[in-house]
Image (cartoon, grey):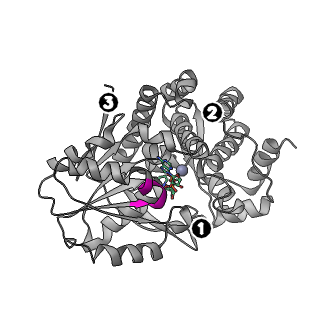
Amino acid sequence: LISRNVNVQLPSHRYEVRIQPGLLESVGDFVKKLPGVSSIVIVSDSNVADLYGKPLLESLARRDLEANLLSFQAGEQHKTLSTCSEMFDRLFSLEPALDRSSLLITLGGGVPGDLGGFLAATALRGIRFLQCPTSLLAAVDASTGGKTGVDHAAGKNLIGAFHQPVGVLIDPLCLKSLPSEEFKSGLAECVKHAVIRSADLMELLESRRKQMLCLDPEAMTELIAANVQIKADVVVADEREQSLRAILNYGHTFGHAFETLMGYGQVTHGQAVAWGMLAANCVAVSRGLLDEAAADRVARLLGALGLSTRPGKFEIDDIWARMLHDKKTRSGRVMLILPSAIGSAEIFNDLSREEVARAMEKLWGE
Ligand SMILES: NC(=O)c1ccc[n+]([C@@H]2O[C@H](COP(=O)([O-])OP(=O)(O)OC[C@H]3O[C@@H](n4cnc5c(N)ncnc54)[C@H](O)[C@@H]3O)[C@@H](O)[C@H]2O)c1
Ligand SMILES: [Zn+2]
């Protein structure tokens, strides 16, 4: 049976990310080996709880482990402090009561992962948590790295904490039920990792595209492991995003602007990031940093993966205003990650409104 492990070796803490088809059935085995777990609570969203709550509870029960399953309404719009507040009410009325030795398991996409991780980071000043990501985006990106948090009306992910999980268990078979738009959203983040860090991953995405698109378990295990390895390397080098970790924001300067301008729920995060990568590539080409052929190659791959390569229409001033509002913008300097070749990228803080206009006009074909 195919299986991959990626080690995340941080100065203060190490954990393993395991990727294996059918792994959901073995979560109980993993939990059984954790020392001194007093009680277990699972945090999920309404969609995923219906699909995988029971299999997870059964996997725990096979090792004589009991757990409470708490779920909240699915969707980014529920990744809020008010959902946290409701969840705290429920967490603190559990039987047996939550204590410092309790384990919280997040089950779902990046929303339950981030929100559940934040509950674990803050309940009783921090309890252990285990990530069981079920969306491709959560598997390849959100579940590894220890960023947890929720959104605020003023912006995405503005409230949060760094809190590393005790492990990440990824079952690629869970992707079978994922809506295709969500699957493509995750693929966009895979392309992001390839462009900023790995020409090998770029080749893997190009050569095994067909197997991936039909969710071949072996191809998916390979793909997820390659992405987690990249994410882990970057996080280990710079856990708190003082420098290198910022390259993971490739495609996100433009992407976040598109996402907010369209309104959450109107476009997937990954689709917005895909447009954002294309826009960043235009800037990189016009600065003479990236050759046109490499930019074309990225666009071809995104298209072949089923992502749109033509951004929606917005006013340049609106895009620019969103960028100036981003939490990564400091004193009017807009951060932008630009690739210099497939597999390497650099961080810049000097994007101009004119460059935004030129990139968008090129992508809109004007
Ligand atoms: N912490 C980090 O480092 C990090 C990194 C990237 C993204 N994120 C966060 O991740 C979130 C996006 O993650 P997401 O795209 O997974 O969102 P999500 O959790 O909302 O999942 C997307 C949709 O797919 C459903 N779903 C998930 N798994 C499923 C499955 N196996 N079968 C059927 N339906 C399933 C969910 O119920 C939801 O409706 C954002 O909030 C983003 O900020 C965090
Ligand atoms: Zn992203």
Please state which of residues 202 and 246 is positioned toward the viewer in this rendering.
202
Numbered circle sitting on residue 3:
3
Which quadrant would the C terminus be assigned to in this image? top right
Residue hosting label 1: 331
Q: Is mark 1 within 8 Å of ligand 2?
A: no
Please state which of residues 249 and 164 is positioned toward the viewer in this rendering.
164
Q: Give the mark toward the camera: 1 or 2.
A: 2
- Residue drawn at x 20%, y 73% is 97
Judged from the image, the secondary structure of the residue bearing numbered disc 3 is loop
Task: Please say if the residues under marks 1 and 2 sit with CB atoms less than 8 Å apart.
Answer: no
Q: CA distance from mark 2 to mark 3?
A: 24 Å
Q: Position of residue 313 (x, y in %)?
A: 80, 53
1 or 2: tag closer to the N-terminus: 2
Q: In the rendered structure, which segment of residues is drawn in magenta?
A: 44-50
How many C-alpha atoms fall within 10 Å of the one at disc 3: few (<14), some, or many (≥20)? Answer: some
What's the residue type where badge 2 is placed?
Answer: Leu
Numbered circle sitting on residue 20:
none
Q: Give the mark toward the camera: 1 or 3.
A: 3
How many C-alpha atoms fall within 10 Å of the one at disc 1: few (<14), some, or many (≥20)? Answer: few
Q: Position of residue 232 (x, y in %)?
A: 37, 42
